[in-house]
Amino acid sequence: MPNSETVKEALKKQAAYGQDIDLEHYEERADEQIKVDDLENSDYKRYMENVGIVADEMDRSGTLMFIDNKPSHCSPKVQEGLEMMSTAEAVKKYDGLTDYYWKAMDPTKDKYTAKTYLEDGDGYFIRVKSGYHIKYPVQTCMLLNKNKSIQNLHNIIIVEDNASLEMITGCSTAHHANDALHVGVSEIYIGDNSNLTFSMIHSWGKQTGVRPRTNCIVGKNSNYTNNYVILNPVGTLQSFPVATLGDNSSATYNTMCIAHESSDIDTGGMVNLNGRKSRAEIMSRSISMGGKMCARGRMVGNAPEAKGHLECRSIILKDGGTTLAIPELEAHIADVEMTHEAAVGKVARDQIEYIMSRGLSEDEAVSMIVKGFLSGGTINGLPPELKKELDEAIAAANVGD
Amino acid sequence: MTDMLKIADLHVEAGGREILKGVDLTVKEGENSVLFGPNGSGKSTLLASIMGYSTITVTQGRILFKGTDITELPVDERAKLGIGMMMQRPPNIFGVKLGELIKASSDDADAALSQADKFNMDRFLDREVNVGFSGGEIKRSELLQLTAQKPDLILLDEPESGVDLESIDLIGRKVRELLFNDDGTNKASSLVITHTGQIMDYINADHGYVMRNGVIEREGNPMDLLKEIREKGYGE
């Protein structure tokens, strides 16, 4: 690990993408621990439910919740083979957790990782032991509850060999904590012959700053699916998860965003195709309602027979914003096959009129197409429980009607 | 019989060119008319003009539907007044499922959806509209949608094209059900583009038009016109 002086230097380092955030703007500490034993009768229930977290924990294998920087809830008893605790507890229990702690993520990546490292950010630790398949999704919730403060969490997810896990992680802000910053550093380790589906749903305030930092290392013959959804207004959000694949493994990213007026969203992801026959698919679907929307995708082919496809599609419904699609393919050997397509623009006129010819108004037709465009983007790999909730959220989103 | 559709001196441009150069055509209530004509004569443009698609611009003339001037009306208002269309090559509607579109366009969604199996389309209700559909599947999907919509005037653009013989019979019977009640009385009127005349076995066509170079060149008994075209072609 780098020495702390080097990391301190990194506190000044701007991130590679997205607008720079002045960390000094957030002067409040947010270290109070708020215990939530009963999720169903909690004041925070409505915020949780906005981001796919089920308060009654029906069809969930367990729940871990953080309010600001302290753990608030952790399911006391979970299925055999599944471990859930705070990162701080795990570090204590496993003698520093040296194989995983800051191993997938470089703390000097940028000012956000550096701050999380230097402040010893706590977070959730979830491990599936070798040979176990966790029946229902595990849910984690991260809530901003204090205005003008920074939440910097450090999460570690481990899916060992021959194991599988679905995770739903919902992040939100209480209405009184609109002008706060969420930083979530997530280190993900997937062993051999294993699967992880990691679905992140965000719902923030109009001034909230959001900087997730996710790196995933995938072993052999494994699959990693990363779904990311944000439908509500946000201040500034920038996220660019990176996955590095072993032999015959695959990564799938599905991103679904609505950039409302005054929202600044910069999302996407990168996959290093380092294993022979590794495969990747990066799909992004976004709508600009007058906000700034940047969809990035990057694939790097480093191993023979690696394959990848990248797709950025964006519909612009209102003028006034900016939509930018940046698909990047990079190869270091000949025996790779990588493709991309990007499309930016309005909804096709012939499609609108086709639906209008069935008696629907122009607004109804646009809305139907846009909602279908969004929900079509996450059909693959999303837990069915979440798909239903998302379809409802898309139906409620104010697009086109 | 009153006029269901009356087109008078219609001039239409598409892609910067004048395609229709003064079309006069009438479909009376309860009447089924067929429209013949060589490729590129303007038949599909005429149907697009009646439906009101923005690919065309009316530069002169009027379109009246049930006595109302619809020349300037948007597509959805024409549909609400009772015009329904089967396109020859409809666009793919990514993200919108066939069942969802039928539900949104019908007054009685359950009844409409319950008929899907009779069109061999029950497996397609959860599929995106037209995406990956074969020629026959597109026609059956369009007819199922029209059945849900229950229009008074049905515009069919080559309903038998790109369809195998077995499917033609199903399509023909479904077109017939759209146009006639069980007792044989008329339910709706139609204007049908056909090259082969096969659809005429099902619709008891009352009147025929031949279009060439953007105008109606001849009209009369549809069987006589078809026979003439088969024997002599469209001529010079």
Image (cartoon, rainbow, N blue to C red):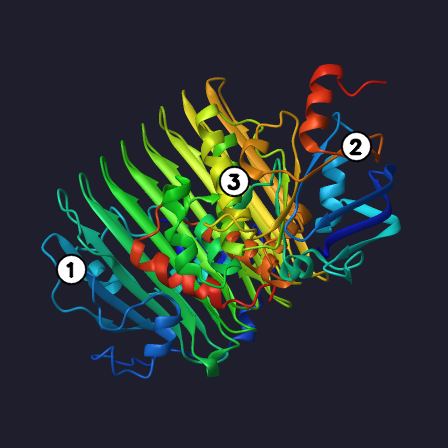
Callout 2 secondary element: strand
**Left or right position of A137 against A357:** left
Q: Is residue A105 above or below residue A261?
A: above
Camera-near label (3 vs 2) is 2
Q: How many marks?
A: 3
Residue A81 visible in the picture: yes
Residue occupying image coordinates x 30% and y 59% = A385
Going by the numbered disc 2, the residue's amino acid type is Met
Residue A358 position in % (x across, y down): 58, 54
- Residue A95 occupies which quadrant of the picture? bottom left
Characterize the local packing of mark 3: few (<14), some (14-19) or many (20 or more) Cα atoms within 10 angstroms: many
Q: Which residue is mark 1?
A: A93
* Residue B53 appears in view: no
Label 1, label 3: how far apart the Cα atoms are? 57 Å
Task: Chain letter for mark 1, please.
Answer: A
The mark nearer the N terminus, 3 or 2, is 3
* Residue at point 60%, 59% (across, down): A359
Q: To which residue does mark 3 refer? A: B130
* Residue A366, position as x, y percentages in the image: 61, 57
Measured as percent of width and height from the top left, residue A345 is found at 67, 48
Residue A263 position in % (x across, y down): 60, 65
In the picture of the structure, the residue carrying the numbered disc 2 is B211
Q: Residue at x 53, y 30 (%)?
A: A339
Q: CA distance from mark 2 to mark 1?
A: 85 Å
